[in-house]
Image (cartoon, grey):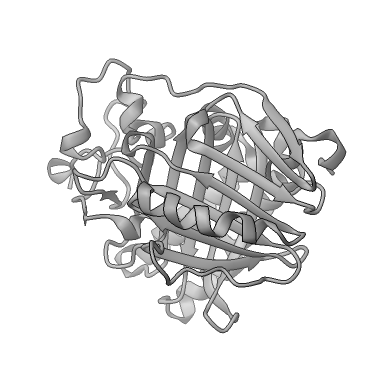
Amino acid sequence: MGDQLVSAIPPHLAVERTRPTSEPDGFRVPFPSFAAWQAPEVRQVVMAYFGAQQEPGALDLDGPDAPRHHDRAEPVDGPLELVTVAYWGDPAAFDRWFDRHRDPWLAAPGRWIEVVRPTVERFEAILGHRRHPHGVATLAERFSDPIREHGYWGSMRDRLPAAQTDEVDDPAPLEVESSGDVVRVRSRGSLCLIRSGQDWSGTDDAERALYLDDVEPSLRAGMDFLSSNGASIGCLHNRYLRIVDDAGAATDRTYGMSWWRTLGDLETWAASHRTHLRIFGAFGRLVRQQGERTRLRLYHEVTVATPDQQWFAYHRCRPGTGLLIADPARRA
């Protein structure tokens, strides 16, 4: 497979690299993964999260300027909350939609909005099965052949087009401003967002048991650590969510999404913290046992958004919601 591997960075975003990669000498990719490539004319996308901690309310996602894709999820554990994430490949359409829906959404208590709108150089998305895209990969024009930048520590930075020439780590404090009951949080640095998903809906009984009995408990322990103690290692907020269908019933799909002070902080946790090493080991055991029979579908998307590409607001939300960590009065 080695001779057939391609770069995760699409050809139209490839430039002469001035920063080194992390790929170890002699490394061999353990299993195939694929990069989601946007069309060359797409220069920026929007990833918008909407939360409702009390009455879910109506969020019009089918009208003019509607997103190309959305899904809804609830916490695997913890207080009731409905999280809708929507994706646009046209920032101008999002702006028009957001101008109509932002204030009505935030009028109700317990509502929040978290938005990033990265340029295509500042996010990457990979998946294990090209026929089953999730998240921002649903906006892709096409998917790459098997890529070489995955399966080693630091590979997600190597997949990020901006990191060919830019360090991208840009830590800075969060700032808070209030307008009535609505709290706005602003970062002066480049925050990192990861959404990492799991879909076991297509597994047979044996693989499902492996996933639910071995992998998922390790994943849940890692999510619990980030939710309760992540601030000590640069994780500003973490959510572990289960996608629900149109009727509100739980599906066999989950994802973790978390905000990090920098991509470097995320990399350090992934490469060295016991909670992530257990997750990584559990997934590895499943892949080795199942081999080519595996039907567990994994994906993730990583964004490093500059300050002007971020927008956060919270209306009378529970303490500790999202980036309210920045506000001592609402931190916990």
Asked whether residue 23 appears in the rendered view, the answer is no
Which residue is farthest top?
18
Answer with the quarter of the image where residue 16 lies.
Answer: top left
- Report the side of 328 relative to 142 (left or right): right
Place of residue 194 in the rendered image (x, y in percent of width and height, measured from the top left): 51, 45
Which residue is at 52% across, 49% downward? 281
Residue 323: x and y, percent?
69, 41
Residue positioned 56% across, 25% down in the render? 189
**Residue 44 shown left or right of residue 70 in the figure:** left
Of 92 and 79, which appears nearest the observer? Answer: 92
Q: Is residue 241 above or below residue 192?
A: below
Against 304, residue 110 (above or below) is below
Q: Position of residue 246 (x, y in %)?
A: 52, 80
Residue at 56 percent across and 60 percent down: it is 215
Image quarter (top left, top right, bottom left or bottom right) of the C terminus:
top right
Furthest-left residue in this view = 3
Task: Indicate the position of residue 29 as horizontal and vertical percent values.
Answer: 29, 43
Residue at the image position 30 percent from the left and 51 percent from the top: 33
Give 310 or 10, whichever is nearer the viewer.
310
Relative height, residue 308 to residue 101 (above, below): above
**How many marks overall?**
0
Q: Is residue 228 above or below residue 121?
A: below
Q: Which of 145 and 115 lies nearest the eye of the viewer?
A: 115
Is residue 51 visible to us here?
A: yes
| Residue 154 vs residue 331, the one in the foreground | 331
